[in-house]
Amino acid sequence: MTKTLLAIGAAAVALTAAPSLAQTTTVAKGVTCTKYVNGQCTETHKVKYKVGYVFGPTYSYTPMTDIPAALVTQYSLSPDYKYVSADGNIYVVDPHSYKVTRVIEVPAP
């Protein structure tokens, strides 16, 4: 009987938590709303793409010539890969699978 009550209690907690998780939405590319007050987004967070994220073949990739030469040398960036420069990071993308293989945080100037 105790196990049944605990299971019901756990299910109730899980069901009540779901609506708050569903409220997190993207308000702009690379930005997600993390806090709402009266239905309005009041706090945002930059989204960072993780290793394994797929940008796809039609994404507008950053030309290697637009990446500072010092970073290309420091991180041994190769023309064999595609690159995305966004939100203070350089994402190294496999040209065949379009998956992020490496994330490089760019130091602020």
Image: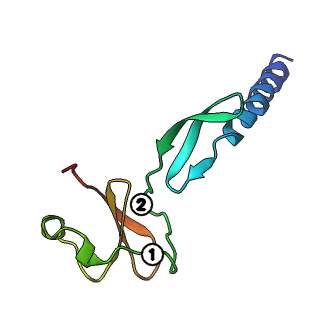
| Residue tagged 2 | 51
Report x, y in % for residue 22.
71, 42
Q: Quadrant of residue 38?
A: top right
Badge 2 element: loop
Closer to the camera in the image, 3 or 97: 97
Badge 1 element: loop
Report x, y in % for residue 54.
50, 68
Position of 108 relative to 5 (above/below): below
Task: For marks 1 and 2, give the one nearer the viewer.
Answer: 1
Answer with left or right where residue 49 lies relative to residue 17: left
| Residue tagged 1 | 60
* Residue placed furthest toward the top: 2
Residue at 78%, 21% (x, y): give it: 6
Report x, y in % for residue 70.
12, 66
- First in sequence, mark 1 or 2: give its number: 2
Closer to the camera in the image, 68 or 102: 68
Answer with left or right where residue 101 lies relative to residue 16: left
Q: Are marks 1 and 2 in contact (CB under 8 Å)?
A: no
Position of 59 relative to 104 (above/below): below
Mark 2: which amino acid?
A: Val
Residue at 58%, 41% (x, y): give it: 33
Report x, y in % for residue 49.
45, 57
Q: Quadrant of residue 5?
A: top right
Position of 29 relative to 92 (above/below): above
Answer with left or right where residue 24 lies relative to residue 4: left
Q: How many marks?
A: 2
